[in-house]
Amino acid sequence: MPWPPEEAADDVVEIHGIRTTSVERAWLDLAALRPRGPRDPLVIAGDARVNRPWADGQRSDPVTTPERLREALRRTGRFKGVRLAREALHLVRVGADPPPETELRLALIEAGLPEPELQVPGDPQDRFAPIVDLGYRAWRLALQYDGEHHRSREQQARDARRDGWLQDHGWRSLRLTADDRLTGFARAIEWVRRHRS
């Protein structure tokens, strides 16, 4: 029998002449590996695959989309882990750059707060306005996760300009680090609760 079977042809791609599992099928296989495991790692993996990564100073195309993940899930039907995949896919979003941004978003949701927007422009009408990692536009609250690349002099200068713009335009801003990640972003949760209005 030829591989893959005709019904699974969409789950196979060719990369450098080698036939391999598609990104969408690999994501579903992760769900099958841990059908009763925590949902968050699968959401993080999904966010990473649908994200439009930075390349040469601009966003490039994602390797897949939420729609293609949804179609693969529908096409696959029943399998061990299908419930976990459905639950995780419901939370996959375009816009989370590093995994801690997904973890922060999920921590805020788990704490009973509204879901923040991702890659929020400080002012959509101002093309020079900075974009914040996560935000609540209605409350003018900005959350920034500062990973290792924020240690460079150039990035620190960009961060200072962004923070200044936000302050001048009535936004409150909270910068988070790996220490916050270790505590499940408890400081961010409390900060949003305190400043929402």
Image (cartoon, grey):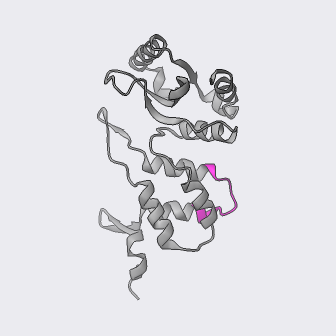
Q: Residue at x 56, y 22 (%)?
A: 175
Q: Residue at x 58, y 53 (%)?
A: 42
Q: Residue at x 70, y 61 (%)?
A: 36
Classify residue 19 by image quadrant.
bottom left
Image location (x, y in percent) of residue 102: 55, 41
Position of 1 with respect to 77 (left or right) is left
Determine the residue located farthest toward the bottom in the rendered image.
Answer: 1
Image quadrant in which the N terminus is located: bottom left
Quick check: 47 above or below 55?
A: below
Residue 179 on the magenta span? no
Asked whether 91 or 124 is in front, the reply is 124
Can residue 144 be seen at all in this image of the molecule?
no
Can residue 117 be seen at all in this image of the molecule?
yes
Q: Residue at x 31, y 24 (%)?
A: 127
Q: How many marks?
A: 0
Residue 38 on the magenta span? yes
Identify the main secondary structure in magenta.
Answer: loop
Image location (x, y in percent) of residue 185: 66, 31
Magenta stretch: give its range. Answer: 31-40
Classify residue 35 by image quadrant.
bottom right
Image location (x, y in percent) of residue 125: 34, 25
Asked whether 38 or 94 is in front, the reply is 94
Quick check: 173 above or below 67?
A: above
